[in-house]
């Protein structure tokens, strides 16, 4: 396949090249002949042409039309972070209410909305989007390609996510905030007991976020399997890319369950069906199976990308390759499979057969083994490395401490008899925060400090970073460790108040103090980001001396990511010496077209050339169309039908073939 | 208000005792594992030399194997697996022990959860000896109790930390739970599954008495309401029967036969009002019947417009229902 002379690898050529150039639109005519990359490397002419081809138009229209994975990824992360702060404020109000017994900061109606909105926000519109946003930003850079496979779909996913989340918070502002808990058990969320529009809005948020999750997951999976740089066989794939692949495949299998369930509830509510009504032969327990079949894997959608962050950051700061790379990959995959066999451990208190419950105990214990493998491999890597103790590594070390506690309390609650004592108590509240904040948010902050220079071109402040870490670490443990004890002392979760005679007052006050410290820590992070954006230390292309491909291009990367697509010969492409005579990059791709390379699944051998889609406004319009449909259908039955017209128009517009596009596709077709 | 036991670590019966022992095993093993892993991490951090971002990476480890470290990792994984298998054995053994509580001569009670109170129907082979209570379970010490659990509206969960773990009450799906109190005392239970506005105020007190005193209590509960002794009580009873009270509440021996709300035949004998929301004294009862929403917002009992005299009369009538 290689046509290059020693330093580059030629992309497969098509006979249609000449004809394609004839079909070029007029404004590009001047560059008609020059712009096939010839392997000259950082050639300014090529870069200039690529810049013109890939640059978004300026202004609002360019902002709305863009399908650049880096802009979309940053947008996902920034939006999700705003919702993280919003959900944190809700949590602060709850902690103020619970600080002392018989308190009256908020009443039961608002409190129920507060904890439902907090949980829904953190699970659906912070954790999953922020991890998918990181993957959207990093994966194409890490695998050495120019954009994602279906960038318009990811653009549409972002707008769906934004509009859905704003709808949820709009409902909350209008006293229609969801109030049945983030797992919205029926009958409480059903037609008879979930009065008003609160649960309708929640069900439709599920549609928005799950559609978003599925669209991004399909996009990421395709990039990883089909667009890796030539030579990046599966065995050479970076660990974060592995984590993203496992997560995306899990999302594709798990998310339809909750979408189905939410829509069945919506049918019960809108049309009077009886899926969950025991009086008419429905079953209230069905919801719990459908929800947790998604809900348990969801924990791993959040946690597995975090494992990827840790496995990326540790080798960089230990200045050596990961110990047990293959074992870590197999552990990630094993976790992905086992995560689907755990859902009943959220339902041990229901009247299911005891023998069946024992199976889920065994599965819950078994999933600790791949996690143990990874923890031991990380410690081994640190043990045998030379340590650069910067803020990202500090957060990873904090992750070890907190996540170990969360993982071990997870083994405790995996045991049926013990779980029946602490299920739905503050012990579980403590456990889930140790796992999700410790297991995902600590690595996420590590990742933000690590990749912030790549995303913005500036280094986040180290001093403020250390302050933030210690405040977060101490505040977190002060806030959540006492909750274990509260659970053992018999305090159920989701109580808007408690009496002084219960004796729960002092530990609740301590937890509220810890929550305040966490709030200060997040504020320090925000200050750090704002100060860095105004005038932080500029970052070089590779400020940490890391090994993966995203550091082989500028900070921030140009819109086209790489002037020439890299060719990979090692697991650590920026560290390992290149065998003599191997090509360094791909040549033969057009700089005038948004052209990329599709490679084979296992070995990443060059396969065909691929035209990335141009930016367009239709994904944005389509998201608005879907908003009209879902909002209207939750307000009236007629909306379920007539509301379909706007999204139908939008999607027809999106797929309406243009003559120019058709001509181009025709000439690009491979001929025998 | 009421001092009652509610702590997983202070068991008052054999079921909670078994789980408490399991918890001690889990805690010990997990603590050892945590300390071990943190020690390994601390040693690694102490041992590894420091570096900067420009330290050349040790890429030779891509090719060479590290047998000593690999052995340590393998031992760690093997140890983890063995410990997990041990804990699995302990957990399954405890489940098995819990399921083998001898049920001979068990007291049968049908417990129905409502938003936001508990209805307890004490079973008896002779139907005339059945009786109904609310928000309290009285049980004899040392005698096993078999609860049939039902929910009338949404999902609730039965839990008395010092006696027995949770069991959900799910509409359309009956469940059972069995336990035994081995020490007399008052145990606090609480709905553990979020069930709406007043989930927080849905306590259930379990009063474990010596068998003789339990028998005396049960006999009193089977008696109907006594005849009024004062004109105020008579006035209160008349208001209760003819007013809105009787539409939801029942008082055995009167015309009041509503089944939507707690049976009040012996309301004055209970420890609390409104599932632990208020102490059960004369002042609280008088305040509650006039405006329940002030104490338990969202509760299904509406405020009643009553003159102070009428409210006092109803309170006096309730006071007589010992």
Image (cartoon, coloured by chain):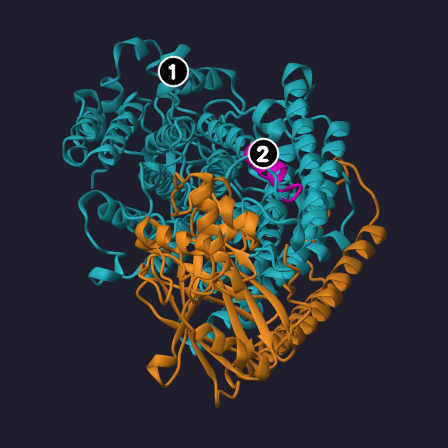
Chain colours: A cyan, B orange
Chain of residue at mark 1:
A
Front of the two marks 1 and 2: 2
Q: Secondary structure at mark 1?
A: helix
Q: Is residue A568 above or below residue A666?
A: below
Location of the N terminus of chain A (image quadrant)? top left
Q: Is residue B170 above or below residue A658?
A: below
Q: Percent position (x, y) of residue A509? A: 70, 43
Q: Residues within 10 Å of mark 2 (few under 14, many from 20)?
A: some
Q: Residue at x 36, y 56 (%)?
A: B154
Could you give the CA–CA distance between mark 1 and mark 2, rounded to whole angstroms?
45 Å
Span shown in magenta: A88-101
Q: Secondary structure at mark 2?
A: loop
Q: Residue at x 49, y 74 (%)?
A: B220
Residue A105: which disc? 2
Chain of residue at mark 2:
A
Q: Earlier in the sequence, mark 1 or mark 2?
A: 1
Pick whichever, A568 or A430, lies toward us.
A430
Q: Residues within 10 Å of mark 1 (few under 14, many from 20)?
A: some
Residue A232: which disc? none
Pick whichever, A216 or B59, lies toward us.
A216
Q: Is residue A566 left or right of residue A190?
A: right
> Which residue has dot 1 on it?
A62
Residue A525 painted magenta: no
């Amino acid at each position: 396949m290689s046509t290059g002379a020693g330093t580059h690898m030629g992309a497969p050529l098509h006979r249609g090249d000449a004809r394609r150039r004839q079909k070029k639109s007029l404004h590009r005519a001047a560059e008609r002949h020059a712009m096939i990359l010839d392997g000259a490397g950082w050639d300014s002419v090529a870069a200039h042409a690529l810049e013109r081809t890939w640059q978004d138009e300026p202004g609002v229209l360019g902002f709305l039309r863009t399908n650049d994975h880096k802009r979309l990824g940053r947008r996902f992360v920034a939006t999700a972070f705003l919702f993280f702060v919003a959900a944190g404020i809700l949590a602060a109000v709850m902690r103020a209410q619970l600080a002392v017994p018989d308190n009256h900061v908020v009443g039961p109606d608002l409190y129920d909305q507060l904890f439902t909105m907090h949980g829904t926000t953190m699970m659906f519109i912070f954790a999953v989007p922020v991890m998918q946003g990181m993957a959207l930003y990093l994966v194409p850079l890490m695998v050495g390609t120019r954009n994602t496979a279906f960038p318009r779909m990811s653009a549409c996913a972002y707008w769906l996510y934004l509009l859905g989340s704003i709808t949820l918070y709009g409902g909350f502002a209008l006293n229609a905030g969801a109030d049945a808990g983030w797992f919205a058990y029926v009958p409480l969320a059903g037609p008879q007991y979930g009065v008003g529009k609160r649960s309708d809005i929640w069900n439709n948020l599920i549609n928005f976020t799950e559609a978003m999750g599925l669209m991004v997951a399909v996009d990421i999976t395709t990039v990883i399997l089909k667009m890796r740089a030539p030579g990046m066989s599966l065995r050479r794939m970076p660990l974060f890319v592995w984590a993203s692949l496992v997560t995306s495949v899990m999302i594709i299998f798990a998310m339809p369950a909750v979408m189905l369930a939410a829509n069945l509830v919506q049918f019960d509510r809108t049309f009077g069906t009886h899926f969950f009504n025991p009086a008419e032969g429905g079953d209230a327990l069905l919801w719990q199976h459908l929800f947790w079949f998604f809900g348990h894997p969801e924990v791993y959608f959040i946690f597995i990308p975090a494992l990827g962050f840790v496995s990326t950051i540790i080798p960089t700061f230990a200045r050596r390759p990961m110990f047990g790379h293959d074992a870590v990959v197999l552990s990630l995959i094993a976790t992905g499979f086992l995560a689907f066999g755990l859902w009943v451990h959220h339902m041990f208190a229901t009247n299911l057969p005891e023998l069946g419950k024992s199976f889920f105990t065994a599965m819950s214990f078994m999933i600790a083994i791949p996690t143990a493998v990874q923890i031991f491999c990380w410690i081994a890597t640190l043990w045998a490395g030379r340590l650069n103790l910067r803020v990202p590594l500090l957060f990873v070390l904090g992750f070890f401490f907190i996540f170990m506690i969360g993982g071990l309390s997870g083994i405790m609650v995996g045991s049926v008899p013990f779980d029946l004592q602490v299920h739905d108590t503050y012990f579980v509240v403590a456990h889930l925060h140790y796992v999700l904040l410790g297991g995902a948010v600590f690595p996420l902050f590590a990742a933000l400090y690590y990749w912030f220079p790549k995303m913005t071109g500036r280094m986040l402040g180290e001093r403020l970073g250390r302050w933030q870490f210690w405040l977060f670490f101490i505040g977190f443990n002060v806030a959540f460790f006492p909750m274990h004890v509260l659970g053992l002392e018999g305090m159920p979760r989701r109580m808007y108040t408690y009496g002084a005679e219960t004796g729960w007052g002092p530990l609740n006050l301590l937890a509220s103090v810890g929550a305040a410290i966490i709030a200060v820590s997040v504020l320090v992070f925000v200050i750090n980001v704002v100060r860095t954006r105004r005038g932080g230390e500029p970052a070089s292309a590779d400020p940490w001396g890391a090994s993966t491909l995203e550091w082989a291009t500028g900070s921030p990367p140009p819109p086209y990511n790489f002037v020439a697509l890299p060719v990979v010969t090692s697991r650590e492409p920026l560290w390992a010496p290149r065998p003599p005579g191997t090509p360094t990059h791909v040549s033969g791709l057009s700089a005038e077209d948004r052209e990329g390379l599709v490679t084979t699944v296992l070995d990443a051998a060059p396969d065909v050339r691929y035209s990335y889609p141009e930016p367009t406004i239709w994904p944005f319009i389509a998201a608005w169309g879907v908003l009209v449909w879902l909002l209207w259908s939750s307000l009236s039955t007629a909306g379920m039908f007539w509301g379909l017209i706007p999204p139908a128009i939008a999607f027809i517009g999106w797929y309406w073939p243009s003559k120019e596009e058709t001509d181009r596709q025709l000439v690009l077709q491979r001929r025998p | 208000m009421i001092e009652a036991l509610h702590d997983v670590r202070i068991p008052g019966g054999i079921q909670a005792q078994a789980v408490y022992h399991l918890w001690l095993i889990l805690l010990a093993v997990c603590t050892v594992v945590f300390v071990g892993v943190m020690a390994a991490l601390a040693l690694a951090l102490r041992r590894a030399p420091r570096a900067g971002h420009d330290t050349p990476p040790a890429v030779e480890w891509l090719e060479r194997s590290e047998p000593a470290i690999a052995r340590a990792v393998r031992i760690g994984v093997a140890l983890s697996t063995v410990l997990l298998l041990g804990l699995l054995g302990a957990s399954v053994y405890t489940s098995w022990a819990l399921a083998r509580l001898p049920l001979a001569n068990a007291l049968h009670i049908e417990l129905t959860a409502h938003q936001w109170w508990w209805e307890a129907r004490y079973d008896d082979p002779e139907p005339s000896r059945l009786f109904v209570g609310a928000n309290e379970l009285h049980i004899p010490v040392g005698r096993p109790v078999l609860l049939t659990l039902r929910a009338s509206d949404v999902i609730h969960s039965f839990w008395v930390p010092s006696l027995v773990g949770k069991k959900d009450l799910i509409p359309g799906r009956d469940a059972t739970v069995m336990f035994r109190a081995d020490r007399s005392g008052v145990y606090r239970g609480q709905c553990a599954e979020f069930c709406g506005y007043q989930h927080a105020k849905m306590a259930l007190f379990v009063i474990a008495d010596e068998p003789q005193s339990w028998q005396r209590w049960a006999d009193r509960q089977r008696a109907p309401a006594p005849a009024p002794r004062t004109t105020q009580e008579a006035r209160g009873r008349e208001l209760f029967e003819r007013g809105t009270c009787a539409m939801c509440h029942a008082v055995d021996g009167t015309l009041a036969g509503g089944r939507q709300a707690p049976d009040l035949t012996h309301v004055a004998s209970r420890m609390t009002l409104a599932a632990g929301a208020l102490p059960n004294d004369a002042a609280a009862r008088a305040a509650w019947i006039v405006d329940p929403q002030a104490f338990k917002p969202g509760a299904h009992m509406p405020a009643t417009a009553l003159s102070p005299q009428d409210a006092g009369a109803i309170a006096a009538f309730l006071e007589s229902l010992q």
